[in-house]
Image (tube, rainbow, N blue to C red):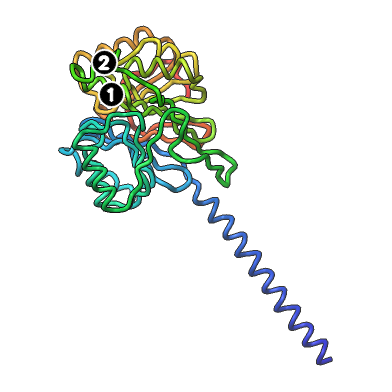
Amino acid sequence: MKKVGKLLRVSVICAFMLALIFSVSQFGTRTAEATVRNMSVHLVNVGGAGFIVELPDGKNMVVDAGVTADKQVFFDKLDSLGITTIDYLVGTHQHVDHISNFDSIINNYNVGKIVFPDNSPDDSTYYSDMAAAANNHGVTIKRVNAGGNIFPDVTLSNGLTLKTFVYSPSATADYSGDYDPVANPAAYVNSYSLVFNIKYGTRGILFTGDGMPPTQQDVIANYPLTDIQAVVAPHHGWNGSQDPNFWDFLQSKSFNTILIPNMNATGSVNTFKSDIQTNRKADFRYYSSYANQDFYYRTDGSTWWPKSGSTAEFQDPTWSP
């Protein structure tokens, strides 16, 4: 009987341990599932361009960060989202309204890596300040060109894939024939902007920096741009920076939403708005930080939707997500 009692106690203990192991493994699975979140793209109301992307795998990305005068606005937004670590700090090019806050971000937040277009001018003081801060904090600057990525593809526990792809600049790009580096240095630098997408599931967003018409032409000549629904208007929507062929090409795809950073009421931008409304027949809508000072565009990997209550400055009646 003692042996039976002992065996019974051992059996009970083993059963308990197995149940405990099973419950822990199940809890671990639920925790892994819980870390998958919607991907949110925050369009921050700063001078220039500034985006905060909460990636579905729990990591965070900043794409440009506006002018130094609005540094606290950008910091306040990061803090309101509870972001202390920026895994990917992405600069589309070296201009003041895109990366002049990067040194402060590196000095005040935990930055994993910096991403910058490889075949791009990098002789501005803003780039130098960024590089110096990166060196002081041991942060790597990853230089990428067309065909590269911001980070390797990730398959999440929900079965959906998160990926990035860089479309421009190409390693052999030379825009000196389009924009003289001395006579028109701003447009020359803009042409080498980092153009890339982030795709979660079947939903993609295209970041364009200040890419000029030759940049846009290169992109549509070499890439199909499938599964991109949202597009950041190149160069803040300035009309002279928009290639009609670029928008015609996007219309033939699944594109239906334009995000315009720091859009204001200048004649050039209004001309772009008018062209979009008059000549672009695809069903679409557009938002800007000018009209929506606290805005995000969010996806679960199959559908995009804007922040509740946000106002589309233009929405085609046939728009569909």
In front: label 2 or label 1: 2
> Relative to 154, is 250 above or below?
above
Horizontal side of residue 137 vs 321, given as left or right: left
Horizontal side of residue 95 vs 62, given as left or right: left
Determine the residue positioned at 51% across, 51% down.
34
- Mark 2 sits on what residue? 179
> Relative to 75, is 294 above or below?
above
In contact (CB < 8 Å): disc 2 and disc 1: yes
Identity of the residue furthest to the top in this view: 279
Determine the residue positioned at 43% across, 19% down.
219
Q: Which amino acid, by three-letter code, is at mark 2?
A: Tyr
SS class, disc 1: helix
Percent from the top left, x then y, of residue 123? 23, 33
- Mark 1 sits on what residue? 190
Determine the residue positioned at 43% across, 42% down.
55
Say whether residue 75 is visible.
no
> Relative to 255, is 162 above or below?
below
Percent from the top left, x then y, of residue 36? 50, 47
SS class, disc 2: loop
Determine the residue positioned at 56% across, 42% down.
155
Percent from the top left, x then y, of residue 305? 43, 31
Horizontal side of residue 94 vs 143, given as left or right: left
User: Mark 2 or 1 closer to N-term?
Assistant: 2
